[in-house]
Image (cartoon, grey):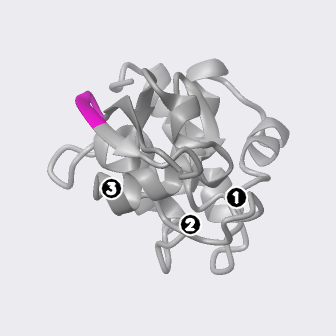
Amino acid sequence: MEPKVITLTVNGRKHQVALPPNITLLRALREYLHYTDVKNGCEKGDCGACTVILNGKAVNSCLVLAWQADGGEILTVSGLGTTSNPHPIQEAFADTGAAQCGFCTPGMVLAAKALLDENPHPTEEEIREAISGNLCRCTGYGPIVEAIQIAAERLAEGGQK
């Protein structure tokens, strides 16, 4: 298959890359552009570890062909905040112990960001629905839900978006 040159803006940085047409966004990000903060879990859309925000919406990057994101804006967890200046969602995850092994955390944080961008005051039920596509084997989800509730409060008080 003939490679196709596409343009992806990841965490504010524009990339042009030639890819075979059957490459998923997950593989393009990890293997071609080296954004290894996007985790490779099941590659079937079941676990949510590969969640990124594409044009404002949380998506499983393993289910999107890279060419479908051509011209798109992509946010990975490394574009959200830094160790010295974490996003309120990242800070709340740390404060509540919502990140244990950490494998699901990037996808969970981005699912939470997409939710809070769309609905700044979600109910617990809405939070649980928003993260229902993201599997965690460590926390039992309680600390994750609590972290998202705390992040919503912090953001409402004027924290960064």
Which segment did they paint magenta? 11-16
Name the residue tied to disc 2: 104
- Res 37 visible: no
- Residue 39 in the figure: left or right of residue 124: left
> Element type at marker 1?
loop
- Sequence-first disc among 1 and 2: 2
Q: Residues within 10 Å of mark 1 (few under 14, many from 20)?
A: many
Name the residue tied to disc 3: 32
- Sequence-first disc among 3 and 1: 3
Observer-nearest residue: 34 or 97?
A: 34
Residue at the location (56% across, 57% down)? 50
Name the residue tied to disc 1: 134
Q: Say what amino acid the circle numbered 1 marks.
A: Asn
Q: Residues within 10 Å of mark 3 (few under 14, many from 20)?
A: few
> Element type at marker 2?
loop
Residue 136 at what x, y percent from top left? 67, 71
Residue at the location (26% across, 28% down)? 12
Say whether marks 1 and 2 touch (CB < 8 Å): yes
- Mark 3–mark 1 Cα distance, whole angstroms, equals 24 Å
Q: Quadrant of the C terminus?
A: top left
Q: Which circle, 3 or 1, is nearer the viewer?
A: 3
| Residue positioned most to the left | 84
| Residue positioned most to the front | 2
Residue 34 at what x, y percent from top left? 28, 58
Residue 146 at what x, y percent from top left? 62, 52
Observer-nearest residue: 154 or 104?
A: 104
- Residue 156 in the figure: left or right of residue 141: left
- Sequence-first disc among 2 and 3: 3
